Image (spheres, grey):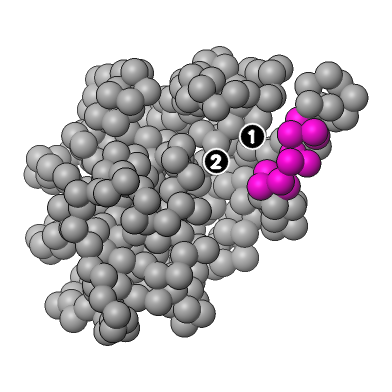
């Protein structure tokens, strides 16, 4: 299948970094609100969700009633998690054209927030950096508090097993109660909600990085977040189960937002932004040239909604907010500056890819 995207592809691999204008984020903040950056992983947005999954999410209507701005037809800077997080904290584009995904580039991508303008600005201005995630991997990076229930070895084993027939045998044994649910992910989101006031009481202002894997459905849940008993699904059924689980994620997100606003009122910054869309065409393992336009758009289509304090209301009219521009948005809000946003760019690649390439004309 041919896709209609244009992308850079040449025999000569470019390892030259983009020459970006140097921006000095050196102003002292006038305002120091608590900040919640909530990343629901694998949480696809509209219009793809409505057109292909036939589900019109309720979360946008709920958030808009609370004063959120939801980006229409939002897309991620990266097709996969590690590229989205890199753009978020680097607040810059790290490549142009096409690059070999070698160890040097991987090290750059996987440094996450360490020694970035984003992290250093928060740290220099006495912010606590708090992490909430079921992936204990994030706890290995600089932080003040990390709420996580799983360890790296567990995540590695489960990820490996899910690529083999063994997981189907295990899921069937769990379904008929011959095996305990040993492969279920323990989601700290539930514990964080339950003890929200305790976990969000600090003397200094705080930045909360909340990375939720709940949308992956390990296991799947119904709209009320109860575990679904059935664990073996045919391919034609999996999208509908994903939607039921999606409703659970919507419920958790809305409950979290209500808790935040009830405690911090309108002086808080809340950004909900998924890292990418879904991969129902096995996008991470399929050769790029064999993917359709629809397959590629599915991976980039994300969900973005944000709420700013009244002293930043002048920033509410933006039409796009990709990860690379999140820190400029926060910086402009906190220091009352007017740093220009970078133009939106989109990069295709996964941790097992040979190359990362820029996608042109995404939509």
Report the disc number at residue 218. 1
| N-terminal label among 2 and 1 | 2
Mark 2–mark 1 contact, CB under 8 Å? yes
Residue 43 place in picture, x, y as percent:
42, 36
Whether residue 164 appears in magenta in the rendering, the answer is yes
Q: Report the residue at 23% width, 33% height from top.
A: 70
Which residues are drawn in magenta?
161-171
**Marks 2/1: CA–CA distance:** 9 Å
Whether residue 44 appears in magenta in the rendering, the answer is no
Q: Which mark is in front, 2 or 1?
A: 1
* Element type where label 1 sits in the image: loop
Residue 35 place in picture, x, y as percent:
37, 48
Q: Say left or right for 39 vs 27.
A: right
Q: Report the residue at 37% width, 35% height from top.
A: 44
Type of secondary structure dominating the magenta stretch: helix
Report whether residue 19 is seen: yes
Q: Against 321, is 100 above or below?
A: below
Report the disc number at residue 213. 2
Report whether residue 122 is seen: no
The crowding category of the residue bearing disc 1, from other C-alpha atoms within 10 Å (few below 14, some 14 to 19, many at least 20), is some
* Residue closer to the observer: 221 or 15: 15
Which corner quadrant of the image does residue 116 belong to?
Answer: bottom left
């Amino acid at each position: 299948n041919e896709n209609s995207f244009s992308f850079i592809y040449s025999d000569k691999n470019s390892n030259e970094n983009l020459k970006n204008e140097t921006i000095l984020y050196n102003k002292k903040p006038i305002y120091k609100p608590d900040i919640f950056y909530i990343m629901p992983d694998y949480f696809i947005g509209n219009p793809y969700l409505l057109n292909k999954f036939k589900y019109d999410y309720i979360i946008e209507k709920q958030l808009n009633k609370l004063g959120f701005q939801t980006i229409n037809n939002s897309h991620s800077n990266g097709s996969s998690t590690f590229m989205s997080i890199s753009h978020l904290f680097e607040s810059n584009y790290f490549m142009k054209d096409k690059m070999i995904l070698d160890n040097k580039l991987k090290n750059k991508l996987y440094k996450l927030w360490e020694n970035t303008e984003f992290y250093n600005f928060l740290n220099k201005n006495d912010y606590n950096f708090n992490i909430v995630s079921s992936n204990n991997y994030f706890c290995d990076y600089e932080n003040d508090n990390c709420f996580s229930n799983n360890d790296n070895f567990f995540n590695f084993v489960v990820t490996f097993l899910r690529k083999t027939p063994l997981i189907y045998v295990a899921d069937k044994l769990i379904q008929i109660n011959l095996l305990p649910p040993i492969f279920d992910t323990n989601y700290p989101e539930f514990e964080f909600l339950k003890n929200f006031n305790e976990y969000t009481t600090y003397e200094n202002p705080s930045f909360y990085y909340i990375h939720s894997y709940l949308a992956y459905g390990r296991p799947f849940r119904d709209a009320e977040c109860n575990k679904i008993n059935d664990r073996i699904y045919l391919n034609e059924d999996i999208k509908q189960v994903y939607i039921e689980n999606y409703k659970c994620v919507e419920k958790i997100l809305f409950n979290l937002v209500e808790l935040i606003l009830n405690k911090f009122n309108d002086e808080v910054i809340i950004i909900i932004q998924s890292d990418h869309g879904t991969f129902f065409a096995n996008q991470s393992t399929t050769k790029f040239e064999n993917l359709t336009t629809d397959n590629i758009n599915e991976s980039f289509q994300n969900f973005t909604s944000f709420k700013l304090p009244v002293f930043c209301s002048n920033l509410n009219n933006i039409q796009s907010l990709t990860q690379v521009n999140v820190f400029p948005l926060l910086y402009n809000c906190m220091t009352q500056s007017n740093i220009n946003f970078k133009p939106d760019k989109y990069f295709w690649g996964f941790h097992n890819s040979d190359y990362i390439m820029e996608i042109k004309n995404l939509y």
